[in-house]
Amino acid sequence: MLSIFLAMTGSMIFSGFWGHNLFYVLLIVSAALLFNYFLSAKDGLFSQFNNHPLVLISLVVLCIFPLFYIERFASFSGEVPLRFDLCFHDGWIFYLSRAFELMIAGIIAEILAKRAGRMEKSSAPSKTPLGNRTIAVHLISFFYLTLVILTLLWNITRQHALNEWKSNIKERIGIVDTSVVSTFTANAIRIDQLSKEGLIHGNSNDIREQIKPLFQPVQNLDAFYLFDRQGELVFSYPYVAEKGLEISDIEVHAFQDVLEKATIQAAFSSYASDVHMSILYPITGEDKTIQRVVIARVNLQSNPVFLPLATLMQSYQQDGLQVAFINTQFNAKTAWSDPVQNDLEETATSLYAGMGLEGWGIEMSLTKKAFLIDFFYTFLPYLTTMLVCVAAVSGLYFLRWERMEKALINLTARFSGENAASDQPERNMAFPRSVLVFLEVLKTVFKKMDRRHQETQTLLDLWNNYDSHTEFQSIVRRILSSFAEDDSLFVEILLEEKEGELLSEKYVLSLEKDTEDFSYLDEQIQAVSQEQNQLVIGNTTRFHQLVRALGKPFPQALIISKFPIDSERTGIFVHALRSFHEFSKDEIDAFNKKAESFYNQIAAILRLQRWLIEKRIFSNLFDSLNFPLFLFINQELIYGNKAAHAFLKIDETEVHTHIEKRVQENEIYNVMLRNSSQERAVITKELPSGEKYEINILNSNDPTAGNISVLLLKDITCEKKRQELTHDFVSMLSHDLRSPITVLQGYSKMLPMVGELNPTQQDYLEKIKGGLETMLALVEGILTEDRIEKGVVISPAEIDLGAVIQEVIAQFESLANQKRVKISVQGATSGVFIKGDAILLKQAFYNVIHNAIKFSGLDGSVEVKLLENDENVVLEVRDSGPGIAALDIPFIFEKYYYPKTGDLTAEKTGGSGLYITKFIIDAHRGSINVDSELGKSTAIRIILPKKISV
């Protein structure tokens, strides 16, 4: 009675202090009753310890320890804990308190027992065999042994898993750090390139135009704010009033640091549940003092530039990781997700690492729930193996123990003279109910594992046979059969295009003996599923949108679910039942959970099938090209057509040679690397074998795939040889024609000296002179062009540019008088000196001024202006001609190009004058451009440096 009183009093006291529930009171009372039962036992296993209550109380503690363990699970708030050692860590004070109470009761009981004189010594060992109580002792020992082993195994593997998670978290922090710091640096450089004078003194329109490249075409920033030193808002984009502008405390601290340290600062703040990164950039004036401060914000969760990072962080959160940006200087913390939710979840481990931004670091923590779930699935195979091994060893132990016990009983009976044999046959003892329940649980677990294994194996078979239409159909029907029930009519998958048309391809599992095709219901099912993703019909007779077909099976209940496949196709899953059905929410949730995995897998395979079909079509199309074609992604060869194999000299016998290895050994790979930064390039490459190729290079950047480079090679060896032969022939012919033309010009000038010519003869003579001049100009142009293409060697000398222009204009006095064109000169006086080749520059000026006179027409005008500054000389020639269309301007400096629009009756010469002019100006490190509009005048502007480096 004393032990019962102490147990009840102690349990109530500790219940008040430690918040125990009623279960504790019952537990301790039960322990006291068990102790008194052992103490009052007159016979049996524990009767020999009646006079030693301390021994009995120790046995009681051992017996009730599992009850403490179960109680700790029962009183746990929230989900059932998975760690076996949870009670040892969290409940040790409770167990020590209970054991201490029982020990006090045992000591008092033993004192009372001694005082009563009930201590007796056992005179002989018990002859009663151990029996069921011995089995109980062995089972208790087995339980504690298993508990200790599992606890050790659990803690060792848990610590190993935590170390692996820490290494994984460290790598993930490095990825996030690299992504954030690189974007911060890139945006800071873009802000640095802005005009500081415009940001300090410019108006709102000027600042808006200046920062527009930060938002278009790529949205690098989400907001741009400009403040003065006092913190007053000067400019905002998008526009927001100063009263409506939200500024976090972290940005205020960073703003003060910018003013004090004159350095670029970063700040991470949370606005409307989104994390923003702010770039605080000081704008200094001419006196090197800070005049303005830029706060540029980037939404890390919705900005397109940060889409890969947001997707990555979402995957981290799905893995149970919580990410936060921490500033040790400001004692600030900005969580990526909801900070309240993060604080509610216990943390298994966390890791902090500094960033490349001053004062900022990244803390990544793993929630306890996510760790335990992941750890449980990782530990389950080891736990199962351990249980199987322990069960096998224990079974062997109990068999050997039972045989040994029988042998000991027979041996004892033989030596004691008692009859060991029994006429009654031994009755088989049934398993305890707890063991049967445990076996049923194991049976259920293994059934679920086997079913999951079968489902996984079926999905693997589906992926292995995606390219075999017959096998693929068969496996899909096998998977559909897993959704079928006893009263199922059919299960099918329909494919719908974006335009709303059903595809001919579908997958049907019919459970009706005489009907295999249910296509008469497809259009009705498609029509009723247009407005919603899932439709559950328990009684189709009340659903009037479905019309029964005469003489054909009709479902009484339907489950219709839609799932996306790609941007152009949608899948419709249909489960038809023969009888009416009342679907509960739990049934629908279980169906959706089971179907979701199948939807993802079948959609991925269908996308792969279409991609392979498109790849096969494009491959056949590219293989039909006679030009080698190479496709690189991130500087790795992905595809090369048949012509590319022939270009690399890979024949059918070289099956062991991979095209990627061969292309890296070829010069074409270096060409791709050198031109990967240009969006488009066309180059000519001569191979060591003498073949010449024109290589067209197209580069693009895809957010998903990466840097894509396409190289198309055109063999121009024969074309180049033909051009060289033609060019050599024309050059030779032009050189041979120049002397006869010069002779003819001389005789045409001498002809009036022989005698006076009548008007008709004089007209014919002028036409002959004009034709000879045209022919001579063509010949001189061809020879000059030949000299240019062979390479011009500039002989720089100090020349008077004004004198050269005056000399060129003087050559056109006769032509200008004939066409009544007035030539006005401004600034073309002597004393404008530059370094250059006088002969080549005279040729260039000649071509420009000649074109201006030629296209000005009768009674026209030509303006020649010569301007200079400290570094350059500018020559501008403006005519009064018909102008040049915008379509023709980009091509007028090409060889032999004639405008497609404008005055079609104008005189056409060689077409190489401006081509030669541009070449000469480029050789002098100058530039030439055209300002013209159809129907108006044309101005050609030449800019030459005063000093050139040859």
Image: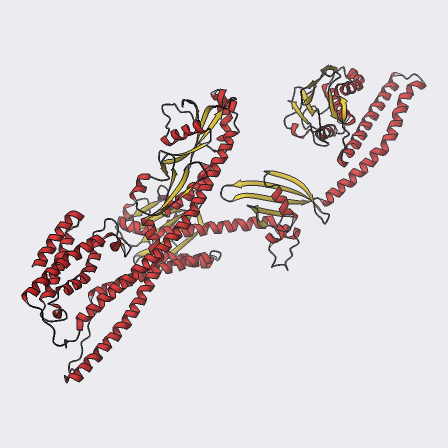
440 or 149: nearer the eye?
A: 149
362 or 515: nearer the eye?
A: 362
Q: Which residue is located at x 37 percent, y 36 percent?
A: 274
- The quadrant in which residue 43 appears is bottom left
Please tell me whether residue 281 is drawn above or below residue 715 in the rendered image: above
Please tell me whether residue 408 is drawn above or below residue 887 in the rendered image: below
- The quadrant in which residue 766 appears is top right
Please tell me whether residue 903 is drawn above or below residue 706 in the rendered image: above
Look at the image and tell me whether residue 911 can be seen: no
296 or 722: nearer the eye?
A: 296
Screen quadrant of the N terminus: bottom left
Q: Position of residue 926 (x, y in %)?
A: 69, 27
Q: Position of residue 122 (x, y in %)?
A: 12, 74
Report whether 735 appears left or right of 270: right
Please tell me whether residue 236 is drawn above or below residue 575 in the rendered image: above
Q: Position of residue 138 (x, y in %)?
A: 22, 69
Q: Position of residue 529 (x, y in %)?
A: 36, 44
Q: Residue furthest left?
A: 116
* Total tally of numbered discs in the picture: 0
Q: Which residue is located at x 41 percent, y 52 percent?
A: 601
The structure's colour scheme is secondary structure
559 or 24: nearer the eye?
A: 24
Screen quadrant of the C terminus: top right
Look at the image and tell me whether residue 658 can be seen: yes
Report whether 872 appears left or right of 228: right
Q: Residue furthest right?
A: 754
